[in-house]
Image (spheres, rainbow, N blue to C red):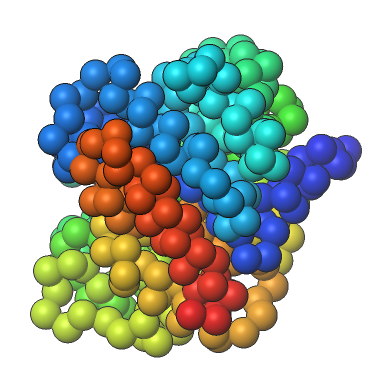
Amino acid sequence: MKKNTKLYETATALLEPGKGILAADESDATAGKRLDMVHLPNEPEHRRDFREILFTAPDIEKYVSGVIMYDSSIRNSTKDGMPFADVLTAKGIVPGIKVDLGVRDLEGFKGEVVTQGLDNLAERFAEYYDLGARFAKWRSVITIDEDETPTEQSLKINAIMLARYAQIAQAADIVPIVEPEVIHAGDHSLERAELVTTKALQILFQTLLEYRVDLSGLILKSSMVLAGDSYSDQTSPEEVAQATLRTFHMSVPHACAGIVFLSGGQSPERSTQNLNAIAKMGEQPWPITFSFSRAIEEPMLKAWGGKPENVQAAQEALVKTCEQNSLASLGKL
């Protein structure tokens, strides 16, 4: 396999110790849910204001290595007309792009879904590269329900979609982040979550290898291994850390460039505490850090309240949250 040093350089920049990736890639509809928190209607100018607060925050580059954007965001600019991707690049932050087009029901498999978005992906990547993107993200959704869910068939088809996306991304000199999200909602135990996550990751990496994806130029975005949010026995950070790292050691080849965590419906505080506990387990074969969305944005939104006079306070809250997660990623919280 021909080595692509551009991919390795980007992956190394994204996985710089003490930094994480901000997942600001909510769809326009999901961004509206964020705006609901500050009592603003879901309109383009308010979505732009929300993004501008995030991307222009002073010193955020100390703790954030990359930002995943949505299609409408990477095409957008600040009030002063500077493209958001250029704002990030000027700070030394790598711009990224979410490229999947969401999930559809997987016919014949009740409650299971498959992610869409491969059509014209090579052409889309060429355009996104010109707009400044150097890494991308594709998310699959894995729900734990009854003993049969998820099925091996649904895990396989989503792994194939992730592998094909990763092939196309690497051909475009774009680092793929593969995100098989195991949904936190449910009444499943920690043991069941560990079993499912391990199986999903094993199938994914076997498929990536079969399709000759260069793992050294690929990042895994993973769920932490957690008991379901409605399970009676909620797990401590230490239990989460042990189960999560056991899963990775059983599933993730050492060649993988690194691992970043999604917050997956956890509170900002719990996400950070669990990340800190994982880092305290010591050095691992891969760099491990955070790629949170709501867990980073929620404190900022509360401080902002949708009011122009609160922008500075909002950015200070944002940077403080990023700093806390930076410390947690090093096990120093």
x, y percent for residue 287? 66, 66
Direction front: furthest residue: 309
| Residue depicted at x 41% and y 33% | 51
Nearer-the-camera pick, 81 or 176: 81
The number of numbered discs placed on residues in the rendered structure image is 0
Q: Nearer the viewer, residue 321 or 14?
A: 321
Query: Can you see residue 294?
Result: no
Left or right, 158 with respect to 185, comes to right
Residue at x-position 80% and y-position 45%: 9
Vertical arrangement, residue 320 with respect to residue 68, above or below: below
Q: Is residue 8 left or right of residue 158?
A: right
Residue 173 lies, with reference to residue 54, above or below; the image says: above
Nearer to the camera, 187 or 155? 187
Q: Position of residue 6 (x, y in %)?
A: 81, 38
**Front-most of 238 and 73?**
73
Image location (x, y in percent) of residue 209? 67, 49
| Quadrant that contains the N terminus | top right
Residue under the point 58% across and 51% down: 59
> Can residue 88 be seen at all in this image of the molecule?
yes
> Horizontally, is 233 left or right of 256 in the view?
left
The answer to whether residue 259 is above or below residue 29 is below
Q: Position of residue 167 (x, y in %)?
A: 66, 33
Residue at position x 22%, y 30% from top? 32
